[in-house]
Amino acid sequence: MPFKNSNPVRLSTKDASPLPKYALIILTGLYIFAGLTWRGLWRQEASSFATMLTMAQGSIADWVAPNVAGLYSGTFGPLPYWIGAFFIKMLHSIASPFSAAQFAIALQDIISVYLLWLTVRRLGCRAELQPQRLAFGGEPSARAFGKMLADSSTLLFISTYGIAAHTHDTSEGATILLVCLLWLYGATLTLDQPLKARWVWGFGLAGIGLTLPFSLFVFFALGTLATLFFIGWRDRSVEVAPIVMLIGLTIPAAWLLQALDNPAFQLNWQTQQAFSPLSWKNQAYFAKNIAIFTWPIAPLSIWCLWRWRNQWQSPMVFLGVLMALIPLTHLFITGQRSDMSMLLFVPSLLLIAPFGLATLNRGRANIIEWFSVIVFSLIAILVWAIWLANWLGAPEFLLNNLKKLAPEFTPEFKWWPFSIALLTSIGWLFLLRWRATRSNEALWRSVVFSSGGMILVWSLMATLWMPWLDHTRSYAKAGKALSQMIPQKTSCVRALGLPESARGAIYYYANVPFVPVQSEFDKVTCPYIISTELTLAQPVRAQAGQVINLSGQSWRVIWTGERVSERKNSLVLLRQN
């Protein structure tokens, strides 16, 4: 009779076969750097990048109180911008500010993958999580089982759309993922090496305090206390808790107290702390998008919690559930939703999804595998078809849709993007051939096509579609045109109702000397105003030469510009008559 453990994992040595290290490194490298190809600054990252640039070009006050060229922002902490600004300053002689910030994002992604691998491997080696002993032996060793789970977690990281969407641009997403995974690694390491790991855990909590919204940091601090006195940690909590909480609370508090000395930042920060129940609109938004955002780790995590329901005292289950409950509770109590809200659920899902994968039978694993093969192959065919439509002029319905979205776009053939796209597609075909001709029982086989497919699609988008995407999303054309309209000796320009993203992009491309937002209109005289059509609320679309009255003063429109995707809300440059 086999020895029956309380966990549901029943594996053989072949099931836990390791993924070759070189393959894991290649896949991770392709995934991280595929999204960092040349392009312009896009709307979703413009304000965060401009905050980094403002710090790099500004004074210590800009480092303490993050701002977008004078527009203070208290939503997130300063750590994402500190990292970006540091690389902008360090690489200024060999790279543009935007390229330097992209490099900082890539480096954070690499560290995040490594932290996840270490965390899952350490949990996978714990005695209470080992597979059941088989009647005639042949079950994997603890080391082999832990490594297989860690390799699978890396593949799941690469496979998740939500991670790719928020960690390939110069926004706060990469840092959010990094600090959350550092917190998880510190908590996991403390189980075995408490005196050494408490410092890692403390800095992980401090990183969360310097990155996430303040109210969410409070929830994480309470979650850290709950963990310190949970089974597995409580025996050493007296030695660990003081260091973890001291480091984790004092560093963010020191920054916040210093930043709140700035009245403008304090006003913005206090506005961000307003609480209200989560609206029905936001609830519907989550319901519609969370499944796509977290595929395939969400279904695997749910399956994990069901199969491991008798192991609720396990550190793996506890940490996974806690890391999901913290942002969920914060979301429903405060109603604070940002573009990164769904990303906060990803670390917990990445932690427990590999353990759900380990309990799948062959049939369920094959569903994930063939679903990935079919979906990513179809997406790749569609990407190639649309690219070819630009050159062949057929099929017409694809070409007409492209012209409708970007009527002024002119395709330009370049050999290096085409070569990369072709090689990546051939690599996908070889991966399909490998699956068809070789039998492999390793558990990571069921998700290797999810990660390979994500790399395929991401690479094709970054090569074949990048010129079109950049044409429709980048502020480069509008920003450079605007820079020609404002004389270099202009002392100040006022932004009126200008979104953070537009303000950041204009600051980068046109180097506009914006007047601080808190300055009163009547007390600061600026010869130019940059605004938008919706803000000006004119009965007809703004045109050059049109006269507009603002606060009893006469202003003339001298330029209008727009991103292709924002044609209904053009930027407007006014000069005082």
Image (tube, rainbow, N blue to C red):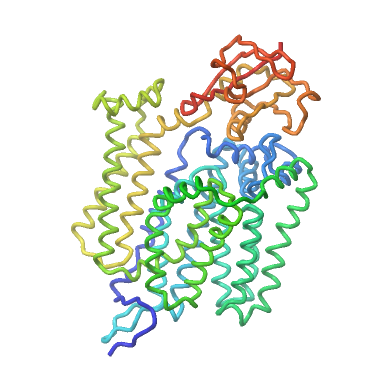
Q: Is residue 277 visible?
A: yes
Which quadrant would residue 138 be assigned to in this image? bottom left
Q: Residue at x 28, y 38 (%)?
A: 382
Query: Relative to 5, is 319 on the left or the right?
Result: right
On the image, the x and y values in percent for residue 189 come to 55, 72
Q: Residue at x 50, y 30 (%)?
A: 474
Q: Residue at x 51, y 35 (%)?
A: 42
On the image, the x and y values in percent for residue 75 come to 64, 47
Q: Looking at the image, which is closer to me, 341 or 132?
A: 341
Figure label count: 0
On the image, the x and y values in percent for residue 399 come to 30, 26
Query: Relative to 2, is 255 on the left or the right?
Result: right
On the image, the x and y values in percent for residue 25 come to 41, 56
Query: Relative to 308, is 374 on the left or the right?
Result: left
Which quadrant would residue 542 be assigned to in this image? top right
Note whether 502 is above or below 255 in the view shown.
Answer: above
